[in-house]
Amino acid sequence: MVVHELISPARTTIYPVRTCVGCRERAAKSELLRVVAGTDAEGRPVLVPDPAQTAPGRGAHLHPVIACFDLAVRRKAFPRALRVQGALDSEAVGEHLRESTARTNRP
């Protein structure tokens, strides 16, 4: 007969983890920028930043740095992650990242 002892696991903080579509590294959801697919005035699909993480629909996450964004664009990871046919205009997210980088680098 096998006797199993109940061992309580050490307390660890549990938080949501997501994978960056650029560098493919896992990070806490709060450290990543969520982006969603939207449409522009002409009805074309565009990539929209969602810093509040409240926009409806499927989202993709990436580190809020230009390097991860460029890597994701080069890999064409956004249409695949968001399950969108064709190309997405990602200029809005690039501009958002450049603005946030400029804001944090101010003295």
Image (cartoon, rainbow, N blue to C red):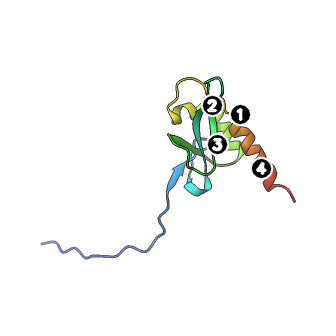
Tell me the amino acid under the disc marked 4: Thr
Tell me the amino acid under the disc marked 2: Val
Real-space Cα separation, disc 3 to disc 1, in angstroms: 10 Å
Q: Quickly name the residue at label 1.
A: 91
Tell me the amino acid under the disc marked 1: Glu
- Packing grade of label 3 (10 A; few <14, some 14-19, many >=20) is many
Q: Quickly name the residue at label 3.
A: 49
Classify mark 3: helix, strand or loop: strand
Front-most of residues 4 and 73: 73
Residue 78 coordinates in the image, percent (x, y): 58, 34
Residue 73 coordinates in the image, percent (x, y): 65, 33
* Badge number at residue 101: 4
Q: Is residue 28 visible?
A: no
Q: Quickly name the residue at label 2.
A: 46
Proximity of marks 1 and 2: CB atoms separated by less than 8 Å = yes
Q: Counting residues from the N terminus, which is met first, the one under dot 2 or under dot 4?
A: 2
Within the image, what quadrant is residue 94 found in?
A: top right
The quarter of the rendered structure image containing the C terminus is bottom right
- Packing grade of label 1 (10 A; few <14, some 14-19, many >=20) is few
58 versus 29 height, above or below: above
Q: Counting residues from the N terminus, which is met first, the one under dot 4 or under dot 3?
A: 3
10 versus 74 height, above or below: below
Tell me the amino acid under the disc marked 3: Pro
Q: Counting residues from the N terminus, which is met first, the one under dot 1 or under dot 2?
A: 2
